[in-house]
Image (spheres, helix red, strand yellow):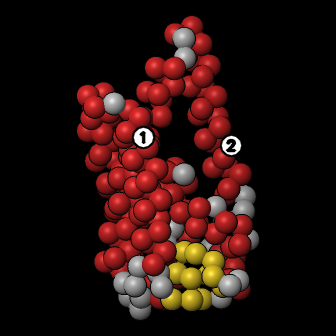
Amino acid sequence: MGQLDTSIVSLVLPALEEQFNTSLHNVQWVAIIYLLVLTGLLTPLGRMADEFGRKALYTGGFIAFRGGEGGGGVARDLPMLVGARAVQALGGAMLQANSVALITAAVPRDKLGRAIGVQATAQALGLAYELTKVTDIAQITSFGAMSTPALVVDGKVKVTGKVISAEAIKTLLAEC
């Protein structure tokens, strides 16, 4: 989820620019804040997991990620959306800081390389599979509310509290 979320949001930046009637300079913060928070918190959250336990941080990561995702889906303005993306990035950092450590703790040392390889391959295949759906907005939004500030409501794509047609987004994606 987190890896897909770092890049796929760039596909909706032009739509957000139109929805919020602002410049790309402003809406690019929807993508930038995610990367800043994620990279800034990976190491400290990994250390916290070492100190306080991985299970709580990993579970909390799912909750924060989905909470930020939902907040982005209902955001009424750009600052709310950027804030929701920051919360989502916090969750992504909690997940990413723990995933390999959980595998390391659960798998015997002689099988560790293979287990981490399987995990990395599964992530890459999942990302590639989801990116093949980019031309079909209904498919994108079925993947965790697009992991961006978009939801499907009655066959239309709802971006940050405003409804735009799925056809308009398909046209936009075709132009990218």
Q: Residue furthest bottom?
A: 21
Residue identified by numbered label 2? 125
Q: For mark 2, give the secondary structure.
A: helix
- Closer to the camera in the image, 22 or 176: 22
Q: For mark 1, give the secondary structure.
A: helix
Q: Residue at x 48, y 85 (%)?
A: 161
Q: Residue at x 59, y 61 (%)?
A: 144
Q: Residue furthest top?
A: 110
- Closer to the camera in the image, 154 or 83: 154
- Closer to the camera in the image, 164 or 31: 164
Q: Is residue 23 visible?
A: no
Q: Are marks 1 and 2 in contact (CB under 8 Å)?
A: no
Location of residue 167 in the rendering, given as x and y in whole percent from the top left corner: 71, 85
Q: Looking at numbered disc 2 in the image, what kind of residue is underneath it?
A: Leu
In this rendering, is residue 64 above or below 174? Answer: above
In this rendering, is residue 20 above or below 53? Answer: below
Binning the other alpha carbons within 10 Å of mark 2 as few (below 14), some (14 to 19) or many (20 upward) gives: few
Residue identified by numbered label 1? 58
Q: Is residue 103 visible?
A: yes
Q: CA distance from mark 1 to mark 2?
A: 22 Å
Location of residue 148 in the rendering, given as x and y in whole percent from the top left corner: 51, 67
Mark closer to the chain start, 1 or 2: 1
* Left or right of 17 on screen, residue 150: right
Quarter of image, res 4: bottom right
Residue 81 numbered tag? none
Q: Looking at numbered disc 1 in the image, what kind of residue is underneath it?
A: Tyr
* Left or right of 50 on screen, residue 161: right
Binning the other alpha carbons within 10 Å of mark 1 as few (below 14), some (14 to 19) or many (20 upward) gives: many
- Closer to the camera in the image, 67 or 136: 67
Location of residue 38 in the rendering, given as x and y in whole percent from the top left corner: 36, 50
